[in-house]
Image (spheres, rainbow, N blue to C red):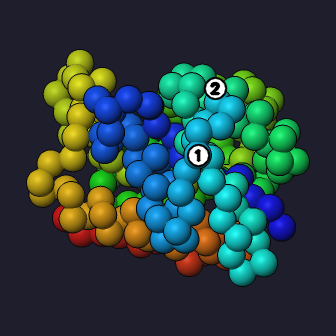
Amino acid sequence: MKFLIVGLGNIGAEYQHTRHNIGFDVADALAAKHNAPFNNDRLAEVTTIRWKGRIMVVIKPTTYMNLSGKAVKYWMDKEKITAENMMVIVDELALPLETIRIRPGGSDAGHNGLKSIQESIATNQYPRLRFGIGNDFPKGRQVDYVLGKWSAKEEPVVLQKIGKCVEIIESFATIGLPRTMNNYNNLTFPL
């Protein structure tokens, strides 16, 4: 069984550890737990994790967010992985910071990374792990908020949620999406 795990983010030091790059941070935590360093490869940084009879190909696209689909399509085709066996980790403005949601598919909700993936693979039916970042910003400041760093108050919750996301990805690869959704979708992480 082979899985494609996609952490969404933007390359470049100025984007590191911002809300929009939480997908990269989760992918890094997963790779670190399994002692699997990333290598630069075609359209992405890539590592492969072999665990409990499963193979997880983990990518962080190097195409910038709005072209993420190009990298996803390339690695799906190269590794012969179906959309059902892919999980995309994405920041989610519509969810409060205290939450994580796992979904089997759905709209891109205005997220450029998801929009690009949907266009490239011609479906919106692929699992995604939505990392709530909240929407605590003044009108017209969404971009600054999304590309901003976590506050000192948010950091402990973010680290806790990143650890839980690693568990969720491992669960998805071993017991499947429905059971993983049942086990994790109602969790909250108090601030």
Apparent side of residue 95 relative to residue 64 in the rendered image (left or right): left
**Residue 188, quarter of picture:** bottom left
Which amino acid type is marked by label 1?
Answer: Asn
**Residue pointed to by mark 2:** 116
Residue farthest to the top, as pictured:
140
Which amino acid type is marked by label 2?
Answer: Ser
Say which residue appears at 72% left-offset and 81% top-offset: 52
Apparent side of residue 24 relative to residue 126 in the rendered image (left or right): left
Mark 2 closeness class: few <14, some 14–19, many ≥20 residues within 10 Å: many
Relative vertical location of residue 184 with respect to residue 146 in this rendering, above or below: below
Apparent side of residue 137 relative to residue 133 in the rendered image (left or right): left
32, 133: nearer the viewer: 32
**Residue pointed to by mark 1:** 39
Name the secondary structure under disc 1. strand
Measured as percent of width and height from the top left, residue 178 is found at 70, 70
Name the secondary structure under disc 2. helix
